[in-house]
Amino acid sequence: MSITISQKVRKLRPSASIAAKQKVDELRAQGVEILDFCLGEPDFDTPAHIIEAAHQSMLSGDTHYTGSQGTPALRQAIADKLKRDNGINVPASQIVVANGAKQLIFDIFSATLDPGDEVIIPAPYWVSYPDIVSLNGGEPKIVACGPETGFKLTPDMLEGLITSRTRWLIINSPSNPTGAVYTREEWLDLIEVLKKHPQVGIMTDEIYEHIAFEGVKNHSPMAVDPSVADRCVIVNGMSKAYAMTGWRIGYAVCPPELVKAVVKLLGQSTTCACSFSQSAATVALNADQSCVDDMVVLYTKRRAAIVDGLNAVPGIRCKAPDAAFYVFPDVRALLGSKTAAGERIETDLDLVNYLLEEAHVALMDGTSYGLPGFLRLSFAASEKVIAEGMTAISKAVSKLQLADNP
Ligand code: PMP
């Protein structure tokens, strides 16, 4: 008997960031030293008090299944956090815990999309959104939001995209890959449009909320205008703020009907998130938050180094991101250039391949995030790697013969 792979999965593209990581690992296995700017996770280890909490919880018997919705203690800690950080009052019954924010985004779309339903996704977007929507029968409606609007969706763009089949607008703020954050006023303007279209839900992926610079604050639409709270969903998690990617704890705030649907899906798929990860996440949220601040201090230094380093390279323009640990420099001026070997760099992906071969620097192409002409570099990398990487990029780019400078 031969096993056939479903149409659905055949159409699925592998995650671009996971594919990039594989390429880096292969080169490293061949002994090539790579300066890696692809990392989509903090390079810090989880703070010791959180690890200790997991250890203690295992010793005290937290080694069994939990309820599918998440433990009452963790859901209460999340409710307290939402009140403290976001000005949102929701009962623990409206919170669902799962194996990462990614699983919740998947399950919420699975619970709400029927074939042909549309989801508006501003580009550049987090690489997984369009595939998660398609996999669940939905139609991703992608709209390019370039540097002119700060990589953000405007009310006019939104109005032009909504149809009777639109079920969701998903916004990742702070954004991976641009670090853009929607202000309160920008949310108010988008909400004004959405009020005319009650069939559209508002999903915000706020996983980078705590990694923000120079006093930039995250705003959840649910807090900005409580009158639309009944169609807002917040997705967040422990991965980025607490350097807990491997612990797989994400959470969502959902209207009660959606909570029930997602819990039903979890009950028939993964049962629950890891019991002792949930205990440790409870401690992480309830404890002193200085470990998060300490990491942000380091990200702030790295952000300055990478932005200055990139802007010093002719042909690259880089805006300092408001939040998250990514920069999304504009490299359109380098497209059309020629390498010393006479090969033409036509696209951002060509440039990524050139920098990998010539400079041994690994980074991501903007095309994978839905906006060609840009690169994405993660600064969840040491200051040493950043300094060496910027020198290597500068040297490799200086060897390119620019199109308007033949
Ligand atoms: N959303 C965004 C925007 C992300 O960048 C990531 C991780 N790269 C996730 C969600 C997934 O987070 P988790 O580890 O909680 O699944």
Image (cartoon, helix red, strand yellow):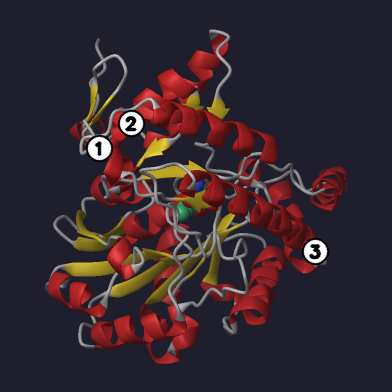
- Res. 166 in view: yes
Question: Residue 133: where, in percent of width, then height?
Answer: 28, 52
Q: Label 1 belongs to which residue?
A: 335
Nearest to N terminus: mark 1 or mark 2: 1
Circle 2 residue:
351
For the point 24% across and 84% down, which residue is it? 193
Q: Residue at position x 49%, y 36% from top?
A: 38
* Residue where numbered disc 3 is placed: 290
Q: Amino acid at mark 2?
A: Leu
Q: Disc 2 or 3, which lies upstream in sequence?
A: 3
For label 3, count other residues whose C-alpha is less than 10 Å away and answer few (under 14), some (14-19) or many (20+): few
The picture quadrant where one finds residue 63 is top right
Q: Which mark is residue 232?
A: none
Nearest the viewer among 201 and 219 is: 219
Quadrant for the N terminus, please.
Answer: top left
Q: Which of the two discs, 1 and 2, sits closer to the camera?
A: 1
Badge 2 marks a residue whose secondary structure is helix
* Residue in view at x 73 percent, y 60 percent: 292
Cα separation between marks 1 and 3: 43 Å
Q: Secondary structure at mark 1?
A: loop
Rendered location of residue 56, percent (x, y): 87, 48
Mark 1 sits near ligand 1, with its Cβ under 8 Å away = no
In this image, 207 relative to 19: left or right?
A: right
